[in-house]
Amino acid sequence: MPLLPALLFTIVITQVPFLFSIWYSLTDWKIVPPTPREFTGLENYTSGYSNPFFLDAVGTTLAMTVTTVLLSVVVGTVLALLLDRDFPGRGVVRTLLITPFLIMPVVAGLVWKNQMFSSVFGVFSWLLETLGFQAIPFVERWPLWSIIVVLVWQWSPFMMLIVLAGLQSQPTDILEAARVDGASSRGIFAQITLPLLRPYLELGILLGSIYIIQVFDHVEVITGGGPGSTNVPYFVFQRSIGGGWDFGQASAYAIIVVIASIIIATFALRLLSGLLEGHEVA
Amino acid sequence: MAEVRYRDATRIYPGADEPAVDRLNLDIADREFLVLVGPSGSGKSTALRMLAGLEAVDQGSIRIGDRDVTLVPPKDRDVAMVFQNYALYPHMTVAQNMGFALKQRGVSREERARRVVEAARILELEAHLDRKPRSLSGGQRQRVAMGRAIVRHPQVFLMDEPLSNLDAKLRVQTRAELADLQARLGVTTVYVTHDQVEAMTMGHRVAVLDRGVMQQVDKPRTLYRLPANLFVASFIGSPAMNLIPSSHDGRSLAFGSGRCAVDPVVATQMARFEATDVVLGVRPQGLALGTGGTPAEVVVVEELGSETFVFVELEHLGKTIRVRVRVDAEYSVARGDRTHVTVQGPVHVFGPDGLRLQTRSEADHGGST
Amino acid sequence: MTTTHRERVLTGETVWGTLTLGLTAWFVAAVFFFPVFWMVLNGFKEEADANASPRLFFEPTLDRFREVTTQTPGLLGFSEAFLNSFWVVAVSTVLVLALAIPAAYALSVRPVRRWRDVLFFFISTKFLPIVAAILPLWIIARDLGILNSHLVLIILYTAMNLPLAVWMLRSFFSEVPRELIEAAEIDGTGLWGQITQVMLPIVTPGIAATALLCVVFAWNEFFLAVQLNPVDASTVPIWVTSNVSTRGNFLAKLSAASSLAVLPVVLAGWLAQKRMIRGLTMGAIK
């Protein structure tokens, strides 16, 4: 069966570590200070669940994911609409626009932090000063939003390409029928283009969420988990190999995240299932 | 070269209640051109794909020659197939497409080239052998698909609506070429189409299917003249036969304000049915316009140039019905004209089970064959 | 195709409207591209020019590129990092394809029963936060003695990209008309022949696009690389961050390093932009 190698590989690499995590999460395993490992049952969960820092991280993750995905979809759709027409240099414009998506996240974070946001030599502050305002240390003042801006910068191009594929797959006879039926450009967009784009927007939201919910690199290089910008991945990292070394507790957080992810994923996959059903019908 | 034999062959798609093909029994002679015809969903394509090995045979069996192929995979059946969309390999040239099956069978390079060139000559494709399918016209692609089947020298040709993607004119032309080619090559051929004109013009015999059940298999002429039941009567013949629910008195049938007599043998059978349980069937050629008969009003005139079909409305058993009448091209008629209709040609009578009542001579000849 | 005046009249567009929207598109593209442009520009500056009020005109120099590509003993070098990345990315991408192609075939051409559930399973693994698995992964890798090796990254990058690759390849495979496979079957090919002689040549562009996306994600991956490979098999992203220094000015140098680091993937992405998205969207929709 040709499916087996891929399936086995995925199960071993992605599922086995979680079984280990579950075991760790039931112990009080710490490396610093080194203590003998003991079984503690659900203690890590009860303490972890009520940890305000953890709850903050959950809130940050949700805010970061939802804001980034929505903004990226909106910006990406606008970009796609701009590109869905003929003008000189369209290919070049599209090439310039997709570049951010290809940039290494670590590089994106560092470039924005040091050369755009910086209050000393940053382009933004220079712009503000040129216009007669005060320079602003963006990252220090708005850590979460700084990260979101970079994420939107990277993910809008991705959304743009998906929406563009959707726009270009519109059957022209439907658009022509609408025009013959007397619909205005605005009417055509609202009543025909948008509904036809819906599956593409859903796909963009789904894929975007999968990746953005896991963002680590940007947090690491832009704020290093500065106030209000620690999302769950970064939080778990800090509590374990990132300096906390409380493996038992960190594993419990991880498991909570996994459970939450499964719940979110169930909803997302229902969306996906809708997409696949559509595929069957057409 | 081989005969093909379907024996109670049945295909039930997983999850379906009704069989797609229900106990098909069909013998196809060596060198015969047999056409499977029917509306969409009639199971004609499924029956063909069962023969190809692309669909499982859930019950019954299929034989090619003296070999039972029911459980033989497609590649070992020695059949060649022409698909509706041609299914040409887009990454191969015309020559590679045509030689692919031979290559799979380990035929030597020289032999392959020889047979490809030979088929290309027959199909007038020699100039295109090095081109990819995408640069060919629809008609050329169709011929490549044919060529791919020809080079194989298979036991059976299978064709699944191979002309349906051609425009009307090319289709008529290719139809004749294909029939000629089949006769020259003398390879048993099973041909699927939904177009009854195609079926009638090409097939040595035609099998009519409806909802998975074979209705009748006969020579085209017999199908036309002696349809076995209402379905075949309505499906075969263009334009279609007029089928009019009627009433009988044991000797004749009501038509409009008059009656038309039927064959005495038919009348005896008819007498067994309720008076209103019969259907009168008469082709447009069997009706005539004139001064006598049932008063009627002309509603539509279809002039074909060589002949004209006229729809008229008339009173029949207390209802207004519409029938189609063939008239000569010279006959002058217009919408709104008042005229009269008489029955002149052969009349068919269908019983409540939909079957056509047979005359003595047919019965003597052993049914409808 | 350029729209003619008559077409514009028919669609109700004005020349001014077209011009304005075209200019807007150019402007937005410039804004989006600016950080990249600025990064490259800074790579050609002296540190003094980079660490100053932003300026467009300066005396360009290649010194920073020379600096970052020169090997300093004991530190992670440019060539070492690129070579590490190259091997990890190349091998993992080949592995992904080797695993994903048969799987995608089984999910599209001859769908196994419950193929939807299988596809869901693959996609659902992408929802599991990697950070939650890093601890056991680290410990397992250490116990197997593959920590700080290419192998551990190769394995994990393969697992990371496999779901996406299966998803995309399934899309491309589903686009191949069923009739073609049936024709090949009747022409006498077995399963292996159908895949290698008919399927793969037709979907080559799709496979290339899938491979490219895997390369992008693997090349840019930082978290696993930094957690599992801090010493012996460090990849390009780690090399980039090693140019951030707490002492002295580093902006120009970091810019030069960053430009080099993103170059391969950006170039590849530019070349394959259209296909990439077709692969992502086609199978899911339609």
Image (tube, coloured by chain):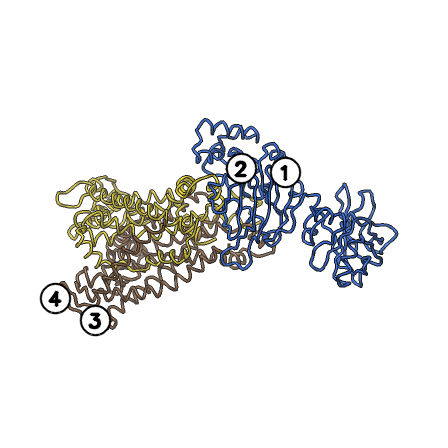
Chain colours: A brown, B blue, C yellow
- In the picture, the disc for residue B155 is 2
Determine the image quadrant of residue B312: bottom right
- Circles 3 and 4, Cβ within 8 Å, touching? The answer is no
Q: CA distance from mark 4 to mark 1?
A: 87 Å
Whether discs 1 and 2 lie on one chain: the answer is: yes
Camera-side mark, 4 or 1: 1
Name the kind of residue labelled 2 in the image: Gln
Q: Callout 3: residue from which chain?
A: A
Camera-side mark, 3 or 1: 1
SS for tag 2?
Answer: loop
Q: CA distance from mark 4 to mark 2?
A: 79 Å
Q: Residue A168 placed where, x, y %?
A: 48, 49
- Around disc 1, counting alpha carbons within 10 Å, would you say few (fewer than 14), some (14 to 19), or many (20 or more)? some
Q: Is residue B68 left or right of residue C273?
A: right
The residue closer to the viewer here, B202 or A43, is B202
Q: Is residue A135 visible?
A: no
Whether discs 4 and 1 lie on one chain: the answer is: no
Q: Residue C233 placed where, x, y %?
A: 19, 47
**Sequence-wise, which precedes: disc 3 or disc 4?**
4
Q: CA distance from mark 3 to mark 1?
A: 80 Å
SS for tag 3?
Answer: loop
Q: Name the residue carrying label 4.
A: A36
Q: Name the residue carrying label 3.
A: A41
- Circles 3 and 2, Cβ within 8 Å, touching? The answer is no
